[in-house]
Image (cartoon, rainbow, N blue to C red):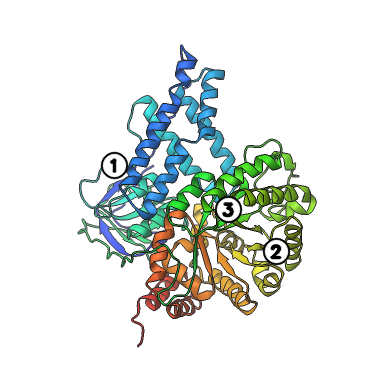
Amino acid sequence: MVQTMSSARLKGVGVSTGRASGPVVTVVHELSEPSSLPAPADPVAEAARVRPAAEAVAARLAARAETVAGNARALLETTAAMAADPALLAQAEKLVSTRGLPAARAVYEAAETFTQALAAAGGYLAERVQDVRDIRDRIVAELIGVEPPGVPELASPSVLVARDLAPADTAGLDPAKVLALVTEQGGPTSHTAILARALGIPAVVACAGVLDIGDVPGLIVDGDTGVVEVAAKRVAVVTAVRQRRVEWNGVGSTADGRRVKMLANVGSAAESVAAAGAGAEGIGLFRTEFCYLSASSEPTVEAQTRAYSAVLAPFAGKPVVVRTLDAGADKPLAFLEPDAEPNPALGIRGLRVAFTRTDVLERQLAAIVAAAAETGAEVSVMAPMVATAEEAAWFVELARAAGVERAGVMVEIPAAALAAREVCQAADFVSVGTNDLAQYTFAADRQVGAVAALNDPWQPALLRLVAMIGKAAIETATPLGVCGEAAADPQLAAVLVGIGASSLSMNAGALASVGAELAGVHSDQCQLAAKAALPTRDPAQARLAARAALTAKRSR
């Protein structure tokens, strides 16, 4: 039941700096679930409606992408590619033909099949569920002839409140009209957070209760502290101070020339194309799970090679880091026949699967080597969920035997961070997965909004763990990357460089803003920002301390 509050103070996770206030506009997301009746009189003709509707949606998103640049353009291009996904359309057409469903219902059910697979996969893939549902609703709306749900036309500057925002919605926001964003769901690494930072719009996510505020005079939003205040009386419109913008030349580097490779996280061929278009210098994390998601049996080496080649091709001659299969009881794959576990997140997942099914890893490595030879990409591989130096050494030896020249590991388990020196000595490089490292450090599932604040990448405890890894990497001369979406926050990216990161990998949409931020600061400022953030007591203090170091005038 909606409650009307004359005054209240809500707390979420601040993800984009700044403070703003103004009247509220709520985004309505719900699109009625399409009926399975009546059955079409001509199933063939009905099935033929699916593809043109999807193509119309993709074309509109692509056209919108042409009107924007940087982060927004990359995300809209990726979303347009999702709308035209052949697998989704083929499944919908099949449902019309075989079950006699109306086209709208068939698209709805086909999309739900995809979202269930993504949700079961967990992690980054589970975070893409909202994206698929947004595409689903746009295609369904096209088929039934109604306006798709989303952000309404804003008559005046307002604070936008929503359950969550899809990439296409966020990418189309006008910073002159949107004073601030507040969402009930989402997290620090969501598309909403990434684009809000890029647009300079104060934003708070995971703000429980914000949709229950009812009719209020206005909201006061603090994107630094995550505090959202309901005004007791009508508030004056106060726009945020926009962050300084620096054009990025496409080369990752600090102002004094310290090289930091700007790489992209991708999970499909469409995302790889978008990343190349956004100026990525390579791929720092290629998630290979997409090749296995819907497979009832293990894909052949040839099938895997084709799938990997499509992702590697846009980066011929450039570095690509391929993460081997991150599956297990929490990301069930039928052909692996996982045993039931009382706590799957702490069970047999990631590299642990390969200890008993080494043949699966060996075939994947063979496909990766073949795809690298076919495309000319400079491919490295890394293993997920490595807990000890012994595991790291085992994987590196296996990769070398398969013909891989450069093999590293992900550090996303606190034990590996605590043994960082030994892990670094066993591997050619290490890459910090801040998303999983945070949720294992704080015992907080990153898909649960109620504990989103604990997964804030500015948490000092998390930064201290990353600093331990950075110290070990520097002392052992081991290249250190960060491939969690913490790297997508421009000021946090500078802190990570100060800790010792030599490469940063993120959602393609964040590349320009992060590259621009680094280009505007010196490496000694990055080190000072790291030193300032580490001893703080909470994320808000860490942000403020880092910002002070990064924005202070350098002494001559």
Please tell me which residue is depicted at 37% across the width and 77% down the height of the picture.
548
Element carrying mark 2? loop
Residue nearest the observer in this picture, 367 or 33: 367
Q: Where does the C terminus fall, quadrant-wise?
A: bottom left
**Label 3 or label 2, whichever comes before in sequence order:** 3
Residue where numbered disc 1 is placed = 152
Asked if the residue at tag 1 contacts the one at tag 3, i.e. Cβ–Cβ closer than 8 Å, the answer is: no
Coordinates of residue 177 in the picture (x, y in percent) = 24, 52
Residue nearest the observer in this picture, 229 or 389: 389
Coordinates of residue 137 in the picture (x, y in percent) = 42, 34
Tag of residue 387: 2
Asked if the residue at tag 2 contacts the one at tag 3, i.e. Cβ–Cβ closer than 8 Å, the answer is: no
Element carrying mark 1? loop
Please tell me which residue is depicted at 36% across the width and 49% down the height of the picture.
170
Element carrying mark 3? strand
Q: How many marks?
A: 3
443 sits to left or right of 255? right
Q: Amino acid at mark 1?
A: Pro
Q: Is residue 199 above or below residue 467?
A: above
Q: Where does the N terminus fall, quadrant-wise?
A: top left
Question: Label 1: few (<14), some or many (≥20) within 10 Å?
Answer: few
Coordinates of residue 518 in the picture (x, y in percent) = 42, 70
Residue where numbered disc 3 is placed = 286
Q: Amino acid at mark 2?
A: Ala
167 sits to left or right of 503? left
